[in-house]
Structure formats: C-alpha cells, structure tokens
Image (cartoon, grey):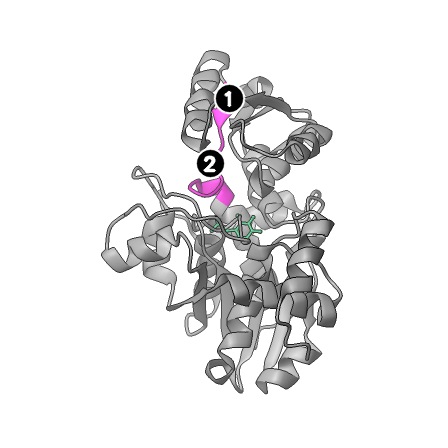
Amino acid sequence: MTIEIAHIRQAQERIFPYVQPTPLRPSHALSERLQAKVSLKFETMTATGAFKLRGATNKLLNLPEDQRARGVITVSSGNHGRAVAYISKALGIRAVVCMPEIVPPEKVAGLRDFGAEIVIHGQNQDEADAEARRIGQRDGLLFVSPFDDADVIAGQGTIGLELLEVAPQLDTVLVQLSGGGLMSGVAKALKSIKPEIEVIGISSLHGAAMLESIRAGKIVTVEEEPTIADALPGPIPPDNRYTFAMCRELVDDHIQVSEDQIAEAMAYILHNEKCIVEGAGAAGVAALLNHPDRFKGKNVAAILTGDNIKVERALSIIAKAQSPRT
Ligand SMILES: *Cc1c(COP(=O)(O)O)cnc(C)c1O
C-alpha cells in the first residue's frame, strides 16, 4: 500500500472532532531577522501538546470494530504514548503503554493521568518493545507504531493540508525528521498539492538515523547519544514499510542542528513567541536562525512540533543558552 493525498484528506475529516487545525502564525521577529516571510505552526496547541495526536487519532478512529473492542498497545513514553493514551480514553478504547524502568516517574504519572494502563518492563527500549509485542499477542492488542503506519502518517500529513489552506504561497517548509512519520505525511500532502514546494528535513546532529539511512541508501543504525531534543533520535527498525522510502523520495534537502543551536532556539522562541517548546519542537527555528542566507526572501514555515518538557528543565536550558534575542 502507498499513502496518497486522498488518505490524508480522509484523515483530516476523520480527526476533526478531536483535533482541530492549529494556528499558523507569522513570526515578526524571525521575518525581520531573516528578511523573509516566516510563519510558525503551533502544534503545541493540540490537546496533548504535540502533533502526534493527529496520527494516533486517525489510527484509532480507523480501527476495525473487533480491534477497537480489544484495544491497542504501544511503547512510547513520549508524545506518541501521550497521544495514544489521551485519544483511547476519549474513545473508550483500552490502551496499554509499555516502557522501560529508566523512564522518569513524572513521565509515567503523566501517561497514567491521561488514562493509559502502564507496564514497566526491562532495562531499555528494546526490552520494553519486546514485552509490548508479547502482551499484544497474548491479549489481542494491536501494536501502534509511532511513525511507520499508514494511518499515523496520513494523520500527521494533515499538517501539510492546513499549511497550504492558510498559506498557499509558501515556498519552503521545514519539518523535523526522526522516524519520519511527520515528514512522510507532511511532504506527501505538500508535494501533491504544490510539487515545486521545497521540503527540508531537520535532524539533530545526535543520532540522525533517518538522515544517515537516506545518505547510505539503506537503513542503518547510528549511535544514540543523549540530546535535549529527546523526541528526535531513535532507531529505524529494519522492517520499515513506509517512512524510509517516502522520506527518500520526498525530502529535498537536510539541515542538522547542534545541541547549542537547539537551546538557543528554545530561548529565542520563549523571548519572541512567548512559548515554551521542547528541544525537538525548536529544531526548525534553530535551522532558520543558523542559516539566514539560505532563507532570505523566502516564504517559509517551520513547525513547533511539541512542548512536552518540564518547565523547570526548559527554563534551565534557556537560562544557559546564548540567546540571539531578536
Ligand atoms: C515524534 C516527534 C518528532 C519526530 O517525528 P517523526 O514522525 O518520528 O519523524 C518531532 N518532534 C516532536 C515533538 C515529536 O514528538
């Protein structure tokens, strides 16, 4: 199966009762600084504070009746887990979120508040993943991938539709790239409507598995290092069905951002947009701030993908950052 614009349009209609369009706001500060027309898409404004609600909602609303009755399982302690937990509760579907012992207690509590059943198992992500698949088999729960799933990709793609509905004159869109669910959906929507639009993937310098895989022409594993953009690194499983091929085909260019650049961008966004975002959420703005000449004169949008970070942690990162304030 390939994902087409029709799937993304169906997703848009399907998720509307649960996920309304998010604001696309012109950034005066960035536009002045880059001598460009820069807008920011506030995915921080969804009910769970990140775009992942789009994909999870499309997935769960599209489940066959018998699977809906049995429920779903996933392994993410981050934005995907929050999204699955939240929308499962809203729809009355059983959701189990499996995670390793290393996940901080406040993240576990946050997920439990959203209504998920929590299973803590194993020393690392791989062990939690194996346990989730085992429980899924045993209880008939469907495993929901955070990115390599047609319904999830179509759900994330609704961002692309919204961008061109509000700003048909956009010529460049920056999209954070990790597992590639966001990129695959958004790029498919954008390029189907406006083939000449430029789509740029934004990766961290740390653990850019998709970018390295695209460069190598095959799925590769990269060393994972801790990063303040903790939603960005993560392996691409070798049985990938959609996102590697779609990202390879649809992404025009790539920019990688450093830890310092992400921290600066978080500070910049707080000072100028009055918004706290997590590291991954600031990566697009980090790319803009550090490549001003590349975007001069362009009509460009970047996505604030999420705000899932403790305020104290965000403020401490921002306090230490070298901030280009305006
Ligand atoms: C998941 C996530 C990303 C990356 O999305 P992929 O579909 O995995 O590429 C970027 N930013 C935030 C905040 C996320 O939660």
Q: Which quarter of the picture shows residue 270?
A: bottom right
Q: Which quarter of the picture shows residue 88?
A: top right
Which of the two discs, 1 and 2, labels the residue nearer the N terminus? 1
Along the viewing direction, whichever of 36 and 193 lies nearer the viewer: 36
- Residue with the most extreme right position: 274
Along the viewing direction, whichever of 319 and 60 lies nearer the viewer: 319
Question: Is residue 145 in the magenta section?
Answer: yes
Q: How far is mark 1 from mark 2, CA to CA?
A: 18 Å
SS at mark 1 in the image:
loop
Q: In this view, does 87 lie to the left or right of 257?
A: right
Identify the disc placed on residue 57: none
In the figure, 132 relative to 273: above or below? above
Q: Measuring 68% from the left and 74% from the top, which residue is drawn there?
A: 26
Identify the disc placed on residue 121: 1
Q: How many labels, in total? A: 2
Task: Determine if residue 21 is in view.
Answer: no
Q: Residues within 10 Å of mark 2 (few under 14, many from 20)?
A: some
Image location of residue 220, percent across then percent down: 28, 47
> Which amino acid is tagged 2?
Ser
Q: Write down the region rendered in magenta.
A: 141-152
Along the viewing direction, whichever of 302 and 257 lies nearer the viewer: 257
- Residue with the most extreme top position: 138
> Which amino acid is tagged 1?
His
> Which mark lies nearer to you, 1 or 2?
1
Task: Determine if residue 218 is in view.
Answer: yes
SS at mark 2 in the image:
loop
Image location of residue 256, percent across then percent down: 43, 65
Image location of residue 200, percent across then percent down: 44, 67
> Which quadrant would the N terminus be assigned to in this image?
top left
